[in-house]
Amino acid sequence: MNFVYANLSTSLATTQPGWLTTLQNLVGPMVACMVAFLVVFWLSTVIWTFRDIRARTQDFLLQIISTVAVAIFPIAGVFVYMILRPRQTLAEIYERQLEEESLLAEMTERQTCSNCHARIESDFQVCPSCGQKLKRSCPKCERLLELRWTFCPYCTTNLAGAPMPSMPGMANMQGVPNSNIPMGGPIPGNRF
């Protein structure tokens, strides 16, 4: 009986239909291609994770943990990494810091009136909004000087004894208000 069963199994193996043999010949390479694709995909996710985390943080331990997690748990590791990774790259953080520093520098360069905080320019002698005296002219070289300076840095004139020149239509700006000009109001005869 064993002999008959053995002959029957060998005769069935040799007499398989042609389409079944062709299918077996196609399935083997297709499975090999699918496995190769999955290995390449897995390897590419590991490399991408390593490059991405290096662009986002300088913490070496976090770089290794993220890469190993994606290597061990390919699909779940990538999803967890995408959720937990830092939002910005180091380059984006650096660029944002430069923008903030630029805005801060621009704000500090912006000059304002000490009285009404209106925007003024560096060559204004008075504030166009409130009439506050901002600078004075040197009596000798007539260049604009800060009010607190006692010497002209351009012609070395001593300004300590020189009275501050008054401007036509201006109130006394030495701290004593003029009674006929309302505080903060327009100055009569002044075009500002």
Image: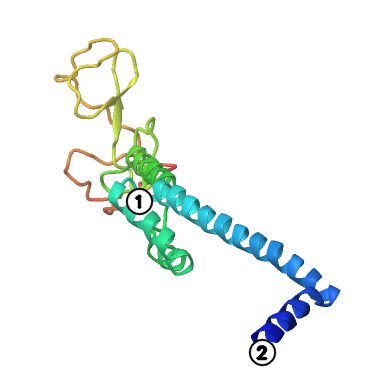
Residues tagged 1 and 2 counted as in contact (Cβ below 8 A): no
Vertical side of 70 occupied by 170: above or below = above
- In-front residue for pair 136/9: 9
Regarding mark 2 in the picture, which secondary structure is present there?
A: loop
Mark number displayed over residue 63: 1
Kind of residue at badge 2: Met
In the image, what residue occupies the spot 42% across and 54% down? Answer: 88
- In-front residue for pair 51/148: 51
* Image quadrant where residue 97 sits: top left
In the image, what residue occupies the spot 45% across and 51% down? Answer: 52
Q: 88 left or right of 37? A: left
Mark number displayed over residue 1: 2
Q: Position of residue 49 (x, y in %)?
A: 45, 54
CA separation in Å, label 1 and label 2: 67 Å
* Image quadrant where residue 147 sits: top left
Regarding mark 1 in the picture, which secondary structure is present there?
A: helix
Q: Residue furthest top?
A: 155
Kind of residue at badge 1: Gln
Q: 71 left or right of 171? A: right
In the image, what residue occupies the spot 39% across and 43% down? Answer: 94
Of badges 1 and 2, nearer the viewer stands 2
In the image, what residue occupies the spot 44% across and 69% down? Answer: 76
Q: 144 left or right of 50? A: left
Q: Position of residue 156 (x, y in %)?
A: 23, 10
